[in-house]
């Protein structure tokens, strides 16, 4: 059974940085994409970043929402079955529960409907 666990959330001040980690356990056949989502109180879940596995032996594809582009960086370590989300220049509007999810396909997207396995989330709070 596939499990996804996020870690690294916390309370920071505006302008500071945090790095979230997402570790997958359990078997998935073939390579797959991993995504990051967030949900603030009273708001819909928002897809913010995605990273594929290696494509055609060349590299990975990444994707970002406009709200985090240029400030957040997604990366991945397949050896450790782990994805990371480096978050710089955090703003109060970044405050949310952050979720990691795994797509059984090796295709990137920011629509949550495409992701099958989900973690329980890690809270990020940014004070002004």
Image: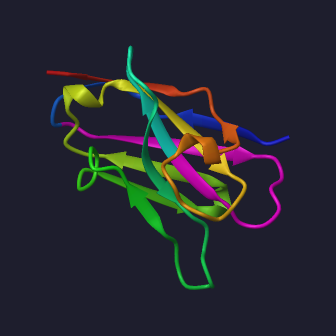
User: Where is residue 127, by image quadrant?
Assistant: top left
Q: Is residue 13 visible?
A: no
Dividing the image into 4 quarters, which one contains the C terminus? Answer: top left
Number of marks in the image? 0
Q: Quadrant of residue 46?
A: top left
Split into 4 quadrants, where in the image is the N terminus?
Answer: top right
Seen at 27% across and 40% down, the residue is 17
Tell whether position 25 is magenta: yes
Q: Which is nearer the eye, 92 or 47? A: 47
Residue 72 point in image, percent of width and height: 31, 50
Question: Residue placed at 45% from the left, 41% from the top?
Answer: 20
Residue 36 lies left or right of residue 101; in this view the side is left
Task: Tell me if 75 is positioned left or right of 58 in this view.
Answer: left
- Which residue is found at the position 58% from the left and 53% from the top? 34
Q: Nearer the viewer, residue 55 or 27?
A: 55
Q: Is residue 27 magenta?
A: yes
Question: In the image, 57: left or right of 68?
Answer: right
Which residue appears farthest toward the top when viewing the image? 42
Q: Looking at the picture, how far across and down is residue 15, in whole percent? A: 15, 36
Image position, residue 49 (x, y; %): 43, 50
Q: Measured along the vertical axis of the image, is residue 29 above or below residue 84?
A: below
The residue range painted magenta reads 16-35
In this rendering, the answer to whether 79 lies above or below 102 is below
Identify the image's colour scheme: rainbow, by chain, secondary structure or one colour: rainbow
* Residue 68 drawn above or below residue 44: below
Give coordinates of residue 16: x percent, y percent. 21, 37
Name the residue rendered at 60%, 74% in the picture.
Answer: 54
Lateral position of residue 15 relative to residue 75, left or right: left
Q: Is residue 111 visible?
A: yes
């Amino acid at each position: 059974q596939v499990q996804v666990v996020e870690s690294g959330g916390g309370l920071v001040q505006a302008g500071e940085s945090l790095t979230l980690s997402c570790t997958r356990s359990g078997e998935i056949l073939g390579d797959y994409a991993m995504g990051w989502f967030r949900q603030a109180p009273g708001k819909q879940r928002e897809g913010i970043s995605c990273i594929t596995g290696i494509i055609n032996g060349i590299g990975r594809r990444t994707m970002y929402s406009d709200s985090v582009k240029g400030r957040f960086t997604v990366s991945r370590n397949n050896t450790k079955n782990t994805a990371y989300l480096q978050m710089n220049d955090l703003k109060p509007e970044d405050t949310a529960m952050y979720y990691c999810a795994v797509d059984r396909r090796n295709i990137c997207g920011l629509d949550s409907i495409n992701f099958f396995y989900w973690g329980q989330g890690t809270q990020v709070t940014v004070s002004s």
